[in-house]
Image (cartoon, helix red, strand yellow):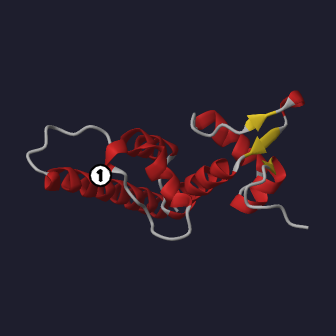
């Protein structure tokens, strides 16, 4: 019998669902302060559905989009956890919540805020392309 979508996952179940080894999930916990599974007696980890979504987002950003750990941390800092989690969803690549975006210079109009968001996304895309290019050149 399969678990419900809202059930907690063990680290082995989470690793299988994410497509990353267990040791990588443990490593990500040390690098990303927003990855916080529940820990029971003996240190056993249990991942909530929202933890799985964040892990999927981190995996996609690191492996599919080519961001570095520092790039993912910067994305989290600038756009918040909700925007980061959108990368883990099956569907649109990212959805922004402007209220979670980093504060910009005083806006003269609503379009200025939207332009800032588009520029931040463009910067993330350019950094990902740069990382992929550097990796290709290093081969």
Q: Is residue 81 left or right of residue 109?
A: right
When the figure is inspected, residue 95 is found, relative to residue 50, above or below; the finding is: below
Is residue 39 toward the left or the right of residue 36 in the image?
right
Q: Position of residue 41 (x, y in %)?
A: 88, 28
Q: Which quadrant does the N terminus fall into?
A: bottom right
Confirm whether residue 127 shows in the render: yes
Residue in the picture at 78% in, 43% down: 46
Question: Is 118 or 96 nearer to us in this picture?
Answer: 96
Q: Residues within 10 Å of mark 1 (few under 14, many from 20)?
A: some
Which image quadrant for residue 118?
bottom left
Q: From this viewpoint, which residue is outermost toward the left?
A: 108
Say which element carries label 1. Answer: helix
Q: Is residue 13 left or right of residue 107?
A: right
Q: How many marks?
A: 1
* Residue at far bottom of view: 91
Residue located farthest toward the top when viewing the structure as drawn = 41
Q: Position of residue 15 (x, y in %)?
A: 76, 55
Where residue 39 sits: x, y (%)?
78, 33
Q: Nearer the viewer, residue 102 or 98?
A: 98
Image vertical order of residue 91 relative to residue 55, above or below: below
Q: Is residue 19 visible?
A: no
Percent position (x, y) of residue 50? 63, 50
Q: Residue at x 52, y 44 (%)?
A: 69
Q: From the viewer's perspective, is 118 left or right of 31?
A: left
Q: Which residue is mark 1?
A: 120
Q: Residue at x 80, y 48 (%)?
A: 11
Q: As displayed, is residue 76 above or below residue 1?
A: above
Q: Nearer the viewer, residue 74 or 134?
A: 74
Residue at (64, 42) in percent of width and height: 28
């Amino acid at each position: 019998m399969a678990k419900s979508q809202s059930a907690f996952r063990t680290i082995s179940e989470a690793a299988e669902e994410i497509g990353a080894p267990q040791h990588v999930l443990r490593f990500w916990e040390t690098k990303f302060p927003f990855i916080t599974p529940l820990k029971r007696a003996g240190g056993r980890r249990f991942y909530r559905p929202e933890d799985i979504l964040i892990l999927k987002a981190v995996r996609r950003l690191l492996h599919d989009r080519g961001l570095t750990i520092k790039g993912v941390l910067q994305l989290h800092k600038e756009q918040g956890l909700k925007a980061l989690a959108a990368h883990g969803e099956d569907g649109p690549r990212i959805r922004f919540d402007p209220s979670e975006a980093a504060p910009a210079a005083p806006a003269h109009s609503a379009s200025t805020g939207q332009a800032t968001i588009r520029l931040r996304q463009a910067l993330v895309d350019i950094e990902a392309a740069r990382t992929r290019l550097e990796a290709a050149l290093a081969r």
